[in-house]
Amino acid sequence: MSATANPSRKRQQRTPATPAAAGPAPTPAPAPAPVPTAPLDLRPTVTLPRGFGRIPVAKVSPVIEGGAYPAKAVAGELFPVRAKVFREGHDAVNASVILTSPTGEETRVDMTPVEPRGLDPWEAWVRPDTEGAWTFRVEGWSDPWATWLHNAEAKLPAGVDIDLVCLEGRDLLERTAVIAEQAGDPVAASILKATAMLLIPERPADDLIEVATAHGIERAMKRYGPRELLTPTADFPVQVDRARALFSSWYEFFPRSIGASYDPATKKWTSGTFDSCHERLEQVAAMGFDVVYMPPIHPIGTAFRKGRNNTLIPAPGDPGSPWAIGGPEGGHDAIHPDLGDWDAFDRFVAKAKEVGLEVALDFALQASPDHPWVSAHPEWFTTRLDGTIAYAENPPKKYQDIYPINFDNDPDGIYREVLRILKLWMSHGVRIFRVDNPHTKPVEFWAWVMRQVRETDPDVIFLAEAFTKPEMMHTLGMVGFHQSYTYFTWRNTKAELQEYLTELSTGMDAFYRPNFFVNTPDINPFFLQSGNPAAFAIRAILAATLSPSWGVYSGFELFEHEPLKPGGEEYKNSEKFEYRPRDFSAQPNLNVLLGSLNQVRHDHPALQQLRQIRFLDAPHDGVLAFAKRDGDDAVVVICSLDPNQGVETDVHFDLGWLGVSGPTVDLRDELSGATFTWGDRNFVRLHPASPAMVLHVLRR
């Protein structure tokens, strides 16, 4: 762990959860995975408030709903702990963060007062180094050394209480020397004892202050100085996930389209299969993506099946929407027979793993009218007054091919069935789920699911596809979703992007991890509908550098952009309702740029995190400039927002924030390979053919 090397001690021992082994099932009809049989406990674990102690500590963060849900971090990620710490009178206070690992090991990280000082804010950045259930607390304490030093700097030059000030200083230094000796640090103890002997009242005031503020004394007192009136807060939870929960590059494709073919003679389509996707997996991996995401792969219902472009009357052979789940072949625990069997799926997962990809599966809790649940569990749906089952609606849109689940009818049965299905796919190597429309299901349900899965399989990741009101999106993150879709698709101007990223990186970072998809099967962004390749490049660069997780739906790299109708954001000839085989090597394309962006992301820890971002002053509204850093790594991104014409502007660097001590800095553009030496003010010209610079801050 990157933390101050202070003495640590053991607290109550806890055993972290161990991921269950995942392996392929040997039969095409796998047995259901076991689920809990005890009554369901839907209550979160709540940390009760403790009130103020001797040293008040207030407004601690990150704390989610009073500690009912854990804040988010990943192994190796820096995250800030903040609090207001103060006391009565004028004596100095100080504060520390005590970070406790899943095994009970404690590490102290001292906090620092930050501006505005008059509001008593304190802060420390901590970095947990392993996955599991961590906790932290803030300890406020009276700082007698800081109090003495303040008094000494005021009294000694004025000739006030010189004998008493020196006596009190010697006492503090000698007491601290004993603490250093007990901690096994004889060097620090010797320095402290020697300094105590130098606090002689007859010495000039300037000499006494110089002795007391020497660097060695400052370091020793910070490490071993007395901490009086120690006042701890409650322990607050932090769930530390694997790195992919924060940093990932997603590529989405429909397996039925990969290798699909049309026979003009018979006017029939032959679907792509899991086995026909293996070459595409290699191509996706070659572009640097690490997650391949598939829409639902289950049987599709025929009742009210939608035709091309969402028409209500399908033509013969139209495959239907994959989100209309369920047919005679089965439901959520079955595979569409056109794609292959369980063995073929296992080969697909194995091939993905071989080339360095993880498989993410769409998890859509809804049913077609042909789903086995409809006949076996009609109580799981809503029956209207006319006796029909209510289908999905988002007026004026109607989805007659989809029945929503009513979670208030037999929640016990529904919850157990959902967990059984998840465990089935997990047993076949799926460790990432993209959850469709989670905001249309009860939050309480998701909190239970997340808790159950985390107890047995803490490596499993859930992405929330919730384009809805902010509070619901935030709450889904709080109860356990590891990543979330965002409003990025609709944030295009400089002001919009800066405001949104500031909110994500400072106001929501404890509970909400963004995934910036540049497009989806449902969203054909207005910014891209011109088909201008520069527009596609700009959005890819912004998504890949602003957010640690980003995603691309296939066709983006080929500049697909035609809307179904003017003013709409749906694709014409949407792949949701038809086969769409593509020539992914057709020119022009963005394959090289996507590969370059993913390589840069993997090379730079600064781009793998969310919290440390600073927007730079660039007067032109058509240029977004920002810097990101993590440890010794720093990257500056300067990106045009205008796909149609060139832009020119000055960009002002904050060299100190970038970790540069001199007046200039050496930079390398990771997209072009060009090198520069710049100062704190730099002229930049960008044009549509080369709309951005991704600059690595070189260390000298």
Image: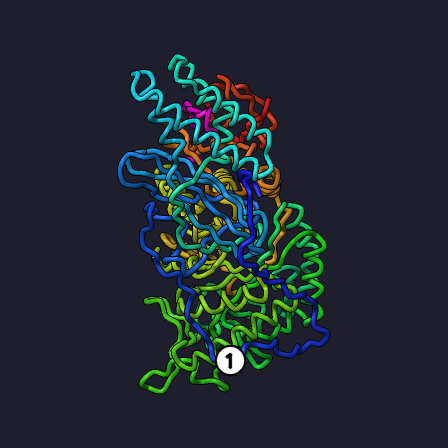
Q: Is residue 620 left or right of residue 176?
A: left
Tell me the residue at 53%/55% (across/down). Answer: 11
Image location (x, y in percent) of residue 503: 37, 45
Residue pointed to by mark 1: 38
Q: Is residue 415 left or right of residue 408?
A: right
Image location (x, y in percent) of residue 364: 49, 68
- Out of 500 and 168, give the one closest to the viewer: 168
- Specify the principal SS of the magenta part: loop
Name, please, the residue furthest toward the top: 204
- Find out whether residue 527 is within the magenta segment: no
Quadrant into which the N terminus falls: top right
Residue 12 vertical position relative to residue 668 in the rendered view, above or below: below
Q: Which residues are magenta?
A: 641-658
Image location (x, y in percent) of residue 38: 51, 80
Q: Residues within 10 Å of mark 1 (few under 14, many from 20)?
A: few
Of helix, strand and loop, which one carries label 1? loop
Colour convention of the picture: rainbow
Q: Is residue 347 visible?
A: yes
Amino acid at pointer 1: Ala
Tell me the residue at 57%/58% (across/down). Answer: 293
- Out of 121 and 639, give the one closest to the viewer: 121
- Out of 551 and 654, give the one closest to the viewer: 654
Quadrant into which the C terminus falls: top right
Tell me the residue at 42%/58% (across/down). Answer: 478
Q: Is residue 686 left or right of residue 440?
A: right
Residue 242 vertical position relative to residue 79 in the rendered view, above or below: below
